[in-house]
Image (cartoon, rainbow, N blue to C red):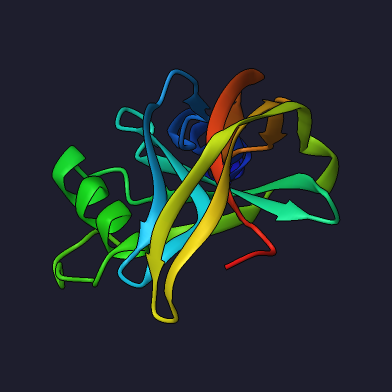
Amino acid sequence: MLLLMIAFASLPCLAGDNAPAVRELAGGKKQEVRHSMIGPRDTLLFYTFEKGQAVLQLQVAPKDGGFTVNGKVFLFDPSTNAEGLAKWVNNQHSDALFADAAKPVEITQLPADTCTVTRSKELGKAEQFTPEGPRIFRDYEVSFSIKGVKVDGKFQLKTFEDKAKVFVKSAGK
């Protein structure tokens, strides 16, 4: 009986040793998407963390004369490879060609105060095709910062800064 009690008492220690490691998310490979099949769209940024089997998706959009940034972290099965992640990213902004893309096992919305626009500047104007015909869009570069986020037992996203280009539809044409 004493041996059985000792065995059960040691189970939490053993489980702790086998617990999944917290995924460190830093230095991801970036992909920027500003066009859909029907023309300009809110900018999507995908940061792929191959070693962490994770993707950070940020959406940068014009709002009330300024810009907003919000994001989600997608965690995938630890056996997911780079090709599976790449196919999943492609399916998020394209025509979903890859039925065999990896599928997230968990999705975490970043808290609103995590993403901060630090600066924006107009780069110029561009004529872009839309379903309604050609339209004029102002082209901006938006700088932002992302605060580190830690979700216990799951992932730790490191603090970083970056830039994205964003189209804003002009009132004319």
Question: Which residue lies at the image location 55% right of the left edge and 58% below the top edge?
Answer: 107
The picture places residue 52, in percent across and down from the top left corner, at 38, 32
Question: Which residue lies at the image location 48% right of the left edge and 51% below the top edge?
Answer: 74
Question: Going by the image, does 18 lie left or right of 82?
Answer: right
Indicate the quadrant where residue 67 lies.
top right
Q: In the displayed orientation, state which residue is furthest to the bottom.
A: 132
Question: Which residue lies at the image location 65% right of the left edge and 52% below the top edge?
Answer: 61
Indicate the quadrant where residue 166 lies.
top right
Question: Which residue lies at the image location 58% right of the left edge and 22% below the top edge?
Answer: 162
Query: Residue 150 or 173: which is nearer the viewer?
Result: 173
Vertical placement of residue 168 versus 29, above or below:
below
The picture places residue 2, in percent across and down from the top left corner, at 60, 40
Vertical placement of residue 89 versus 11, above or below:
below
The picture places residue 12, in percent across and down from the top left corner, at 60, 39
Location of the C terminus by quadrant is bottom right
Q: In the displayed orientation, state which residue is furthest to the front.
A: 173
Vertical placement of residue 36 versus 3, above or below:
below
Indicate the quadrant where residue 98 lies.
bottom left
Question: Going by the image, does 133 lie left or right of 117?
Answer: left
Residue 52 appears in the figure: yes
The count of marks equals 0
Query: Residue 159 or 165: which is nearer the viewer?
Result: 165
The picture places residue 108, in percent across and down from the top left corner, at 62, 54
Vertical placement of residue 52 versus 44, above or below:
above
Residue 111 appears in the figure: no
Query: Residue 56 or 5: which is nearer the viewer?
Result: 56
